[in-house]
Each structure stands twice: as structure tokens, then as C-alpha cells.
Image (cartoon, rainbow, N blue to C red):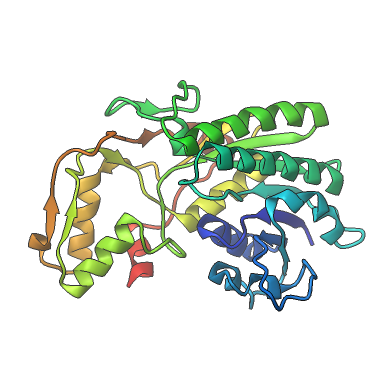
């Protein structure tokens, strides 16, 4: 059986990726954050360490997964948890400590990514490393401009800046190690395991309850993609993507955000008067990503409709 390593395995994108990898007959070393409590015995590869983190309860009943709980600064210990004789094909690094922490903490996440790549090199000399970046790396792109992988990155948030830094340093390190390396920039994922605090789950929850919700003007372009489709794209890139390249992963159907909101209202059979549109957001982030490179190199295409993705919120 082929095997892979996934960090950030119990988060939104990570849990969807692990489920699709298992569906594709991979054995998965699923790495999550270690959340110790006073009673814990001290064995790192023990689900007990995860009991204070509800995300880490995901996937526990799925066969074919070896659950490992480590903090980013402990990634040098990852090779110890790979089964004897096993040589994983791919290492997907999704772990990151969040979008909100300031520059000092974001730098720690960059260092965690570098530790992950070093661990990958220890695990196998032939492993392929797939680093997961973000649309935030591009920053503010003029409204309506198509975002290809070769346009300049001008991130405006610490999160975007340090994701971009991680890409540059990982690419440099991969050359030093002689390791195959891809960088993926995810756009606007929705669906299973999406945090309740985000816009679409919040909108559905408000409409279901008959409560009103105020939004921005919603005149910017957006391009939602179901996280399961994104997982399939990452798997396709792991097998067919070109080493050293950057790839956008998005839905391939950018629309004005208000159109998505109105479709949600229709799908919920809700009163459109419950939603109030206000001023343009600041900064005005408008996203029309190109996935031409991804499609050309892998043949991947999204399969899950926006309406079907909404079913996870009901």
C-alpha cells in the first residue's frame, strides 16, 4: 500500500485531504497538534494528547490512518513514527498556526515548515514535498484581473507575507536537499469541516434561524471550491505536478460574491430581505484565479457544485 504524511491533518483542508487519500487507498500518517493536559502520560503518539482539541477527534474511526500528535517544534521526531520498512511517497504540509497571530508567531510557523521538510528528507530520499500556501500571498489584485501563478505577490497581511516567505525558503531548501517540491495556493475553500465562524456557514445559520445578516457590498469576484475537490487537486498534483512549480487551486468559475449569496438564499428558501448589503470592504480583495496550469498538468477539474457544498451547513 502506498503511504503519505499529512501535517495539519485534522484541520479544515487537512481532514478533507486525509479522507480523499484513504479513499484513494493510501495509508496516511496524519499529524496533528499535541494538546497535553495534566493527566497525560507523556507518549506523544497517543490520541490522549488530543483530548483538549476537538479537531483531533476527526477521522478517528477511519481505517488506514496512523494518528500522530506533535507540535511544529517537534517535527524532527516525525521519522520515529514511520513504520519500519515504509517509505512514504508524498509529504503534504498543511500545518500552520492560524491567520491572526502577529509576525513573530508567523515566523515560528515558517520554521515549522522548514522542520517538516527536513523531517521529510529523513523519512525518505525519494519523497515529494507538497507545501500548502494561500490566496493571501497575492494581496490586493485589481478587480477583474486574472490571477495566474506568475503575477507578482504583494501580500498585505502577516499571514500572507509569511506564507510567501515559507514558499521561498522551502524552495531553496528543497534544492539543497535534492527533493521534489511543489507549492499550492488554495482559494476560498468551503464545505465539510469548514469553521462555523466563516461567512457562508454564518449566513446559512442566520437564514435558517430567520435572523438578519449584514454583509459588505459583495461586489468583488470570488471563486469558491469544495474542500473535497481541493483535496483531489492536491492528490493529482502530488502525482503529476512539475517539481519546483507553484499551482493555484480554485473552483474555475469566479463569480461576483453577491451571486453566491443570492444562490444561498434560494437554496435555503429563505427571505432575501434578511440579508443587507453595505459598503465595499477595505481592503477590497477581488479574486479571479486561473487554474489553467493545474488543469494542463493534471487533467483535474472540480466536480462538486456550490449548492451541494452548502448541504454541509444544514
* In this rendering, position of residue 285 left or right of residue 302: left
The quadrant where residue 274 appears: bottom left
- Judged left or right of residue 243, residue 292 is left
Residue lying farthest to the left in this orientation: 273
Q: Which residue is drawn at 67% across and 55% down?
A: 6
Residue 144 or 25: which is nearer the viewer?
Answer: 144
Foreground of the two, 51 or 292: 51
Say if 45 sits above or below 143 in the image.
below
Residue found 20% across the figure and 68% down from its top: 207
Q: Which residue is drawn at 30% across and 25% down?
A: 142
Pinpoint residue 167: horizontal percent, then vertical percent. Answer: 61, 32
Can residue 307 be seen from the camera position used here? no
Q: Which residue lies furthest to the front in this view?
A: 38
Nearest to the observer: residue 172 or residue 295: 172
Across and down, in percent, residue 122 comes to 86, 45
Residue 308 pos. (x, y %): 35, 63
The quadrant holding residue 69 is: bottom right
Do we see residue 69 in this rendering?
yes
Residue 118 placement (x, y as % from top left): 79, 41
Residue ID at (82%, 31%): 177
Relative to 3, say whether 118 is above or below: above
Split into 4 quadrants, where in the image is the N terminus? bottom right
In the rendered view, does 62 fall on the left or right side of 180?
left
Q: How many marks?
A: 0
Q: In which quarter of the image is the C terminus?
A: bottom left
Using the image, determine if residue 272 lies above or below residue 72.
below
- Quadrant housing residue 10: bottom right
Amino acid at each position: 500500500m502506498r503511504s503519505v504524511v499529512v501535517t495539519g491533518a485534522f484541520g479544515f483542508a487537512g481532514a478533507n485531504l486525509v479522507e480523499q487519500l484513504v479513499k484513494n487507498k493510501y495509508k496516511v500518517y496524519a499529524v496533528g497538534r499535541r494538546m497535553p493536559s495534566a493527566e497525560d502520560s507523556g507518549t506523544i503518539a497517543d490520541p490522549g494528547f488530543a483530548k483538549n482539541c476537538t479537531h483531533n477527534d476527526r477521522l478517528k474511526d477511519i481505517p488506514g490512518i496512523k494518528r500522530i500528535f506533535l507540535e511544529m517544534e517537534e517535527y524532527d521526531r516525525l521519522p520515529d513514527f514511520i513504520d519500519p520498512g515504509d517509505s512514504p511517497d508524498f509529504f503534504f504540509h498543511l500545518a500552520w498556526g492560524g491567520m491572526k497571530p502577529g509576525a513573530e508567531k508567523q515566523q515560528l510557523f515558517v520554521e515549522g515548515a522548514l522542520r517538516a521538510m527536513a523531517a521529510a528528507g529523513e523519512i525518505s530520499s525519494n519523497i515529494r514535498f507538497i507545501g500548502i500556501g494561500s490566496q493571501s500571498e497575492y494581496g490586493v489584485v485589481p478587480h477583474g484581473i486574472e490571477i495566474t501563478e506568475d503575477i507578482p505577490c504583494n501580500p498585505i497581511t502577516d499571514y500572507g507575507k509569511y506564507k510567501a516567505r515559507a514558499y521561498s525558503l522551502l524552495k531553496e531548501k528543497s534544492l539543497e536537499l535534492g527533493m521534489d517540491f511543489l507549492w499550492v495556493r488554495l482559494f476560498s475553500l468551503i464545505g465539510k469541516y469548514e469553521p462555523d465562524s466563516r461567512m457562508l456557514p454564518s449566513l446559512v445559520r442566520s437564514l435558517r434561524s430567520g435572523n438578519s445578516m449584514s454583509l459588505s457590498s459583495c461586489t468583488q469576484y470570488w471563486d469558491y471550491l469544495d474542500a473535497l475537490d481541493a483535496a483531489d487537486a492536491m492528490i493529482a498534483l502530488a502525482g503529476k505536478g512539475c517539481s519546483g512549480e507553484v499551482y493555484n487551486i480554485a473552483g474555475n468559475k469566479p463569480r461576483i460574491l453577491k451571486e453566491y449569496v443570492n444562490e444561498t438564499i434560494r437554496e435555503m428558501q429563505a427571505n432575501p430581505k434578511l440579508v443587507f448589503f453595505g459598503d465595499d470592504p477595505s481592503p477590497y480583495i477581488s479574486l479571479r484565479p486561473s487554474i489553467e496550469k493545474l488543469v494542463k498538468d493534471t487533467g483535474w477539474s472540480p466536480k462538486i457544485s456550490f449548492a451541494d457544498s452548502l448541504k454541509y451547513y444544514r
